[in-house]
Image (tube, rainbow, N blue to C red):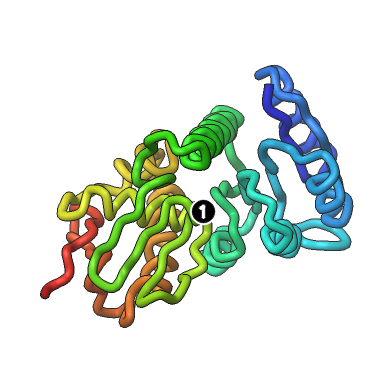
Amino acid sequence: MAKILVVEDEKSICDIIVFNLAREGYEILTAQDGTRAYELALSDLPDLILLDVMLPKMDGFEVCRRLRAKGAQMPVIMVTAREEENDRVLGLELGADDYITKPFSMRELQARVRANLRRSAISSQSQSQSDTGERTDAAHGELLEVGELRIDGRAMDAYRNGQALGLTAREFELLSFLARFRGQVFSRRELMERVWNYTSLGGDDDRTVDVTVNRLRGKVERDPSTPKYIITRRGAGYMFAEPEA
């Protein structure tokens, strides 16, 4: 069973989370400050980190940034009581995979944990198949070239005119998914189900999709204000467009 690192400095909240996740069969590690969380993440290599933002010694944003700088790829779900979009943008930019705001239900948290663990397992399996030469899907093995873009499943990154874009794992998955089905419009709910791997509850989920799309446009598009690849279809969702010749 998967190992989860729960990072929360409020003991009552930590105890509730640990109780409910342990009941699901997960092995649980805990940390009450950012420094200890960073050390445990590197030494014990959990399969997923549930990471509060407001922590003593080192905040959750800095923990996430340092882990990604070290090459740690386990899913990170940021947890915060704050709802400002700037926090969401920063967390996703630093490499967080998901974001949940307090107060949240245990049912929602468990669903997000399962979805991120499932996505991580699929990514690892696909990358392993790619490394051994087996056939994989476009997200993790193939090379897609569209206009100025080259989407490299083996490197898990994209390039524009040969320059690496430095995509996070979630940005890459969203880009490769849309590119594989270019010309097809996907609603936010569909993207949550197909890319984030769980049923959207609206609200925060919709904003998570929008923020990730905006961050992705900032890296992929020459002019994010007038995108030519990742297009909004108002009232319907997002699509990847074939560039004009």
Please give the name of the residue rendered at 32% of the width and 42% of the height, measured from the top-left corner.
189
Name which residue lies at 47% across and 71% down.
164
Left or right: where 168 falls relative to 50: left
Residue 115 appears anywhere in the view? no
Label 1: state its secondary structure.
helix
Q: Kindly identify the amino acid type of the residue bearing the numbered disc 1.
A: Ala
Residue 186 x, y percent position in the rendering: 24, 48
Q: Quadrant of the N terminus?
A: top right
Horizontal arrangement in the rendering, residue 39 relative to residue 21 (left or right): right
Classify mark 1: residues with Cα within 10 Å, few (<14), some (14-19) or many (20+).
Answer: some
- Quadrant location of the C terminus? bottom left
26 to the left or right of 230: right
Q: Residue at x 36, y 48 (%)?
A: 142
Tally of numbered discs:
1
Image coordinates for residue 134, horizontal then vertical, percent: 42, 34
Q: Is residue 21 above or below residue 130?
A: above
Q: Along the line of sight, which residue is nearer the eye, 221 or 124?
A: 124
Give the percent coordinates (x, y) of residue 6: 75, 39
Using the rendered image of the protein, determine whether residue 57 is visible from the camera's viewpoint: yes
User: Does 191 appear above or below 19?
Assistant: below
Q: Which residue is mark 1?
A: 169
The single residue placed furthest to the left in the displayed view is 245
Please provide percent x and percent y for residue 72.
69, 51
Residue placed furthest toward the front: 133
**Res 34 quadrant in image:** bottom right
Residue positioned 27% across, 64% down in the render: 230
Whether 211 is drawn above or below 180: the answer is: below
The quarter of the displayed image where residue 197 is located? top left
